[in-house]
Image: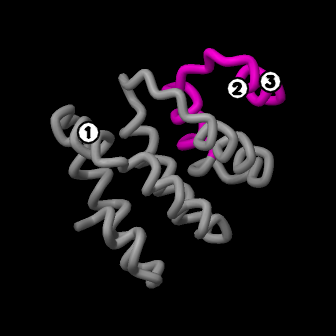
Amino acid sequence: ILFGILTTNPDEGVSNSALIALKRVSSDNEDNITKMVEQGGVDVALDFLKRKSHDKDLLATGFGLLSTLTKNKSDNNSQLLNFAVSEMRNNPNLPSLLAGTCSVIRNLSVDDVEQAKVTSALV
């Protein structure tokens, strides 16, 4: 239901509430995290954030959720990596957003040449 809100509800207040609820449901609950990831939660959240990239509060909340969903997972998601790096470049002065993007990048496995090139720009 909560991921459905992200794909169908245009209201940003409701969407932000759904992101917060997803993060809380997943916090310290490995079973829920696994279920969310298996149901495509990373891709749903990423697609949502790409559509709402103008709203920095939503981005910060969304990257917090993505950080939780990618923690302890050997995820190799080039789109997520590219988006996180792009948002870091575009928003260098937003600590809440940077904290989420850094956590996501820390959680992703960077094991391919293209991904290594993307992340080398961060150094």
* Magenta residue check for 116: yes
* Contact check, label 2 and label 3, Cβ < 8 Å: yes
Could you tell me which secondary element the residue under label 2 belongs to? helix
Q: Quadrant of residue 35?
A: top left
Single out the mark in the foreground, 2 or 1: 2
Is 93 above or below relative to 53? above
Label 2 – label 3 distance at C-alpha? 5 Å
* Residue at the bottom extreme of this rendering: 11
Along the horizontal axis of the image, is 108 left or right of 28? right
Taking the spot 45% from the left edge, 44% from the top edge, the residue there is 66
User: Height in image: 119 above or below 2?
Assistant: above
The residue carrying mark 3 is 117
Which quadrant does the C terminus fall into?
top right
Drawn side of residue 82 relative to residue 70, left or right: right
Q: Position of residue 40 (x, y in %)?
A: 36, 48
Whether tag 2 and tag 1 are in contact, CB under 8 A, the answer is no
| Residue position marked by numbered label 1 in the rendering | 33
Magenta segment boundaries in residue numbering: 98-122
Q: Please report the residue visible at 20 percent of the width from the left and 32 percent of the height from the top.
A: 30
- Mark 2 or mark 1, earlier in chain: 1
Relative image position of residue 18 (x, y in whole percent)? 33, 67
Q: Tell me the quarter of the picture where residue 21 sits.
A: bottom left
CA distance for labels 2 and 1: 24 Å
Q: CA distance from mark 3 to mark 1?
A: 29 Å
As helix, strand or loop, the secondary structure at mark 1 comes to helix
Where's the N terminus, which quadrant?
A: bottom left
> Can you give x and y, in whole percent of width and height, for residue 78 in the image?
62, 35
> What kind of residue is marked 2?
Gln
> Which residue corresponds to mark 2?
115
Left or right side of 35 for 57 = right
Q: Amino acid at mark 1?
A: Ile
